[in-house]
Image: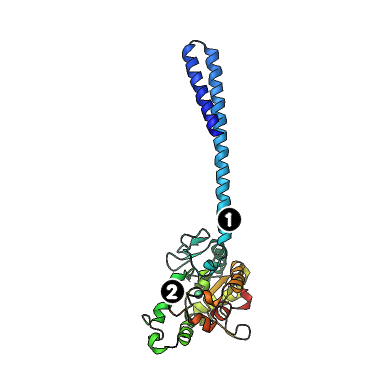
Amino acid sequence: MGVRILTSVIHIKFFINREIRANDADLPIKLIYFFMKQMIFGLLGLAFLACGAASEKQQEGKMLTSMQSDFPTVDYIMGKFDPAKHPDFTVIPTIYADREGLYLRKDVFEAYKQLHAAAKADGVNLVIISATRPFNYQKGIWEAKWNGSRLVEGKDLSRAIPDPRARALKILEYSSMPGTSRHHWGTDFDLNELEDAYFQSGAGKKVYEWLTAHASEYGFCQVYTAKGPDRPEGYNEEKWHWTYVPVAKQLTDFAQANLTDDMISGFQGAEAAKAIGVVGKYVLGINPDCR
Ligand SMILES: [Zn+2]
C-alpha cells in the first residue's frame, strides 16, 4: 500500500513539473498544481504520523507484556537478574542512601520516599545502607564464609565446622544462602546500622521507635522480629531490615508456591539447603504481619 502511494506521488510530481515547465506563464494552473501538491504531502504526513503512533503503541504493549512475564518468576525471586538493567528498578539517590549504586523496585522506592519524608518531619533520619543484592553478590559473600577466605567470629569455618549442615547454619546466623534472600527482591532494605546495639539507645532507639509506630502506615514492616510462637524459625531479630508489604507479599506467596530447596544450587555448600529446609525455615520464617 505504502509503495503504491509513493509511486503515484512520484508520477504526479513528474507530471506537475513537466506541466509547469510547459506552461510557465499560466498562473492559475500553477496554483492548482501547488495546492494539489500541498494536499498530497499533507495526507502523506498524516499517514506517517498514524504509522508512528501505531508502532509506539505496539512498543508500549511489548514492554507491558515483558514486565508482566518477569514478575514474578523463580529466577526473579532468586535474584538472577541485574537490577541496573531491569525496567522495574531504579537507582536510589544518595540523599536516601549511604553510597551510590543501590537499587530498589520503582514502586517500592516511591513508597519509601513517603516514609522517609514522614520520618524527617518528625526529626528522624532514615538512611538505606543495603538494598537489592543479586544472586551473584550473595554467592560471593556466602562462599567467602563457606571456604574460610572470610572469617566468621574470628574463625575459618571450613576448618572449624567440617559438617556442611552445621557450617551452613552458622553462616545463616548472619547471611542468606544465595537464591533465598529477600534482598534479591527489590522490596527489602536495611536502615541506618546492622547492629542491634545501635537501636537500643539514643538516636537509634528513636529511629526504631518511630518505625515501629509509623512504618506500617506507609506499607512497611519489620521482617525479622524477635523469635517466639509467631516466628519460631529463621533469622534472628533484625531491627534494620524492612520490607514494602504490598509488593513483597506477592513475592512471599510466590516463593511459598514455587520455590523449593532443590532449586537452591549453584554455589559451594548448596547441598545443605535441603538438609536445613532453608526455604520453609528462612525464606518463609518471617513476621506474620509482613504477609
Ligand atoms: Zn537485610
Residue sticking out furthest to the left:
149
Can you identify the residue that label 1 sits on?
65
Question: Do we see residue 267 in this rendering?
Answer: yes
Label drawn at residue 186:
none
- Please tell me in which quadrant of the rendered image residue 39 appears: top right
Q: Nearer the viewer, residue 97 or 236?
A: 236
Total marks placed:
2
Can you identify the residue that label 2 sits on?
139
Disc 1: CA contacts within 10 A as few (<14), some (14-19) or many (>=20): few
Identify residue type, mark 1.
Answer: Thr
- The secondary element bearing badge 2 is classed as helix
Is tag 2's residue or tag 1's residue first in the polypeptide sequence? 1
Disc 2 versus disc 1: distance between alpha carbons? 30 Å
- Please tell me in which quadrant of the rendered image residue 287 appears: bottom right
Ligand 1 within 8 Å of disc 1? The answer is: no
Rendered residue at 44%/70% (across/down): 136
Residue sticking out furthest to the top:
25
Placement of the N terminus among the 4 image quadrants: top right
Height in image: 199 above or below 105?
below
Q: Nearer the viewer, residue 88 or 102?
A: 88
Where residue 223 appears, as percent x and y from the top left, is 57, 76
Q: Is residue 143 left or right of residue 35?
A: left
Identify residue type, mark 2.
Answer: Lys
Q: Is residue 156 left or right of residue 11?
A: left
Ligand 1 within 8 Å of disc 2? The answer is: no
Where residue 79 appears, as percent x and y from the top left, is 50, 68
Disc 2: CA contacts within 10 A as few (<14), some (14-19) or many (>=20): some
Placement of the C terminus among the 4 image quadrants: bottom right
- The secondary element bearing badge 1 is classed as helix
State yes or no: discs 2 and 1 in contact (Cβ < 8 Å): no
Rendered residue at 42%/76% (across/down): 141
